[in-house]
Amino acid sequence: MSVLEKIEPAAASSLVPDDMELLRAAVELTRDISAARPGIYWPDMLLSAALGYGALAGAILASNWAVALACAVVAVLALYRALLFIHELTHIHRTALPGFRTAWNVLVGVPMLTPSFMYENVHTLHHARTRYGTAEDPEYLPLALMKPWSLPAFILISALLPVGLLIRAALLVPLGAMIPPLRQLVWERASSLSINPDFRRRPPEGDFARMVHWQEGATFVWAWAVLASTQALGWRPLLIALAVVAATAVFNQIRTLVAHLWQNDGEPMTVTAQYLDSVNVPPPGIWAELWAPVGLRYHALHHLLPSMPYHSLAEAHRRLAARLGTGSTYARANYPGLFPLVGRIARSTMLRGR
């Protein structure tokens, strides 16, 4: 049996009982590595952002197309890594890294028109035991059970994200301030990084609403500053930046495509079933650190331990693999790489299309 055949669709269903040995081991073996370390978070985020913006500037300023293309590739990878810290912001305790959320929004979230409110209080719904894989999960679609055309559409539509974000920040937000029904529509349908088209976001409340207010205002100001810059600099810098962000969005959508097996048909699932419907791509493969950085190569493990900081996931994986062994439930969520996973989901859609 190949590694890609080891989980049939029924294995990721509500019928799978919880493996209590796995759940206990996940907690017991990782207590001492569960704290977020500022000495890792800050340099990683700051260096990724600095490298990304520096490379983007190189892509814009370079007169040689080969140099510009090389700079653009570096910009995509570095800004992709910097952006994915938004995932960490949804899970770390608010007091764990003082100032990190604000710094990330100022340096990455607002300039990339993706402030943290677009993921906070949304992504945690994906981890709710009774919501995962159901119609109430904002980050789940049964892609493996859909038609073949759904996969290319799922990936290609993400290329439109930067233009959509620019329109949202520059036009829809200010218009929504004057037209309440539009504001409600934009908030419900276009204010979260979700893939479920049926998801409707609830209105923000309390401190979170105040955070949304300043982040919305900052993205509005930044969007118009970027548009105004075209009067002095022309459209070339903006178009290159949009292309880099579009490539980053496509890259992330491909990662999302293989983060789960997408085999659930809407029924609530046990924690173990959710784990088996998710994917780890552990070493020895080296490329996963590029396409699934900031700990996302251990996405199944993350569903067992959602609050575990990204820098501890590799050690948590090592401990669990050593304790539970190759024949365990834990080992069944480990896969060798990106392309075999894409092929697995594509084959599943092909069978559905017949």
Image: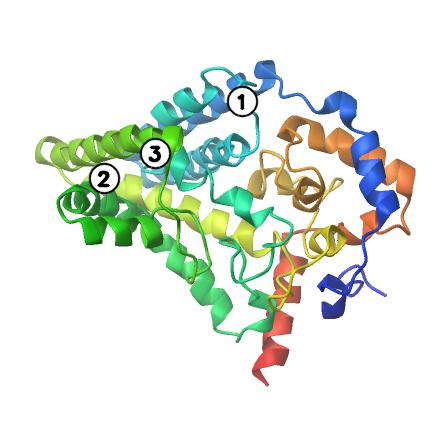
Residue 238's disc is 2
Q: Quadrant of residue 37?
A: top right
Q: Earlier in the sequence, mark 3 or mark 2?
A: 3
Mark 3 or mark 1, which is nearer the start of the sequence? 1
Seen in the picture, residue 85 relative to 46 is either above or below; the reply is below
Judging by the rendered image, the residue that carries numbered circle 1 is: 44
Q: Is residue 342 left or right of residue 205?
A: right
Could you tell me residue 209's position as x and y percent? 34, 34
Who's the residue at 52% across and 36% down the image? 87
User: x, y percentage for residue 101?
Assistant: 44, 24
| Location of residue 199 in the rendering, given as x and y in whole percent from the top left corner | 43, 57
Which amino acid, by three-letter code, is at mark 1?
Asp
Instruction: Tell me the CA gap for discs 1 and 3.
Output: 29 Å
Foreground: disc 1 or disc 2? 1
Crowding near the residue tagged with mark 3, few <14, some 14–19, many ≥20 C-alpha atoms within 10 Å: few
Q: Amino acid at mark 2?
A: Leu
Residue to which mark 3 is pinned: 209
Q: Would you say 210 lies left or right of 39 here?
A: left
Rendered residue at 34%/35% (across/down): 112
Q: CA distance from mark 3 to mark 2?
A: 31 Å
Q: Residues within 10 Å of mark 1 (few under 14, many from 20)?
A: some
Going from N to C along the chain, the mark reached first, 1 or 2, is: 1
Mark 3 element type:
helix
